[in-house]
Image (cartoon, grey):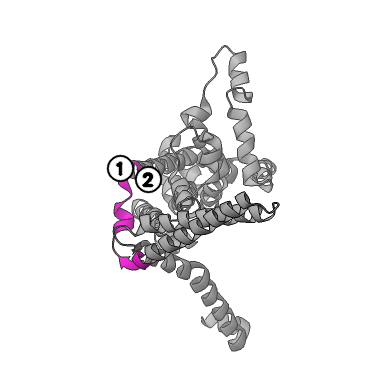
Amino acid sequence: MNSLLRSFGPHLTALILLLAGVWIVGMIIGPQLIMVEQSFWHLDRGGDAVNITVQIDNEYNDVDLLLFDKMDLEAEKASAERDAKIAEIVASIAQKRAIIAELETREVTPKKVYSLRNYTIMGGSHLAIFLKTILASVAVTLIAFVVCYPMAYTVAKLATPNKAALIMLGLIVPYAINELLRVFAWLMILNYNGVANFLLGLIGFEPVPFLESGSGVFIAMVYAYILFMVFPIYNTVETLDTAQIEAARDMGAPTWQIHRKIVLPHAKPGIAVGCIMTFMLTAGSYSVPYIMTRGTVEPWFTQLIYNKFFESLNWNTGSAYAFTLLIACVIFVFLMMRIFNVSIRDIAK
């Protein structure tokens, strides 16, 4: 606070704090509180209220159809038969309206009831999809770490400045393309008749169903979020004094011991940040699993959330599902902090 006051003065500092507060409350805390509140209530329409509402809608639809028939008959040439049909339709409309009036007297105003119903109706199948999504996200995070740690260490400590720049350029340039286009590119590469299976066929292997087996999701996920694992590890490894590595090597320490006792302990904050970012992006991804499986396997949990919000229009259950996923991500964040023995301040660096 004192540094802000010294740098910008009281008036500009107050404006900065006000804008930051509006952003935090309006874009972060506010929506989460609304989602949590919605997840704990549902509308109780009474025992047979839903069926009554459906009957009323059906009767209104019938009245509309009868009115259209009446208009068509009135446009025809006058005749006794036409007049009889019109009178019959008018009588039917009056009968339908009487039924609607009677049903509306039995219709119950929905009541807002607070309970855990939106969480308890998740059911076995949806719970299994939730657990599968969490475990798959952990697997993607582990694969991304295995792929990215050697890359980050090479760029930070082994590569010359020119080679390091080329490697970083090769990592960053593809991200100038929209994520959906990159995922569709992997869809064509891993398709049954795609590039990957074509190359496997050249060396005598049978085609592999990457997409149908779900393995394509892991490949596309690791590629889509690789930067979020590479850069945090690279930033921490780069700050490691190379003299420590050289001293350990001069004393005869093997490479794996150097990484276990020197590099990895120093890179803990970067690894924690990379794992947190990769896990949260993977668990919250919607487009990647949907495109890469083409709807042939069980959906990702985010697809269930989307369906609850935009297909069944059940925002209360969708909020409960979304809040459940948020809680899982928060637990993972604290778990990473505990495993790597780092604090929020270490992660923020």
Query: Type of residue at label 2?
Result: Phe
Which residue is the site of mark 1?
Answer: 124
Rendered residue at 58%/57% (across/down): 67
Q: Is residue 328 left or right of residue 291?
A: left
Farthest front residue in view = 80
| Residue 274 drawn at (x, y percent) | 48, 50
In the rendered view, would you say 15 is above or below 37? below
In the rendered view, would you say 219 is above or below 27? above
Farthest top residue in view = 204
Query: Type of residue at label 1?
Result: Gly
Rendered residue at 62%/45% (across/down): 179
| Residue 74 drawn at (x, y percent) | 66, 56
Quadrant in which residue 251 is drawn: top left
Which residue is the site of mark 2?
Answer: 130
Pointer 2 or 1: first along the chain: 1
How many residues crowd around disc 2 within 10 Å: few (fewer than 14), some, or many (20 or more)?
many
| Residue 344 drawn at (x, y percent) | 42, 63
User: Is residue 274 among what the camera can see?
Assistant: no
293 part of magenta stretch = no
115 part of magenta stretch = yes
Per the rendered image, the range of residues in magenta is 105-125
Q: Is residue 128 left or right of residue 223?
A: left
| Residue 339 drawn at (x, y percent) | 34, 51
**Residue 316 badge:** none
Q: Nearer the viewer, residue 165 or 100?
A: 100
User: Is residue 125 among what the camera can see?
Assistant: yes
Distance (Cα) linking label 2 and label 1:
10 Å
Quadrant in which residue 163 is drawn: top right
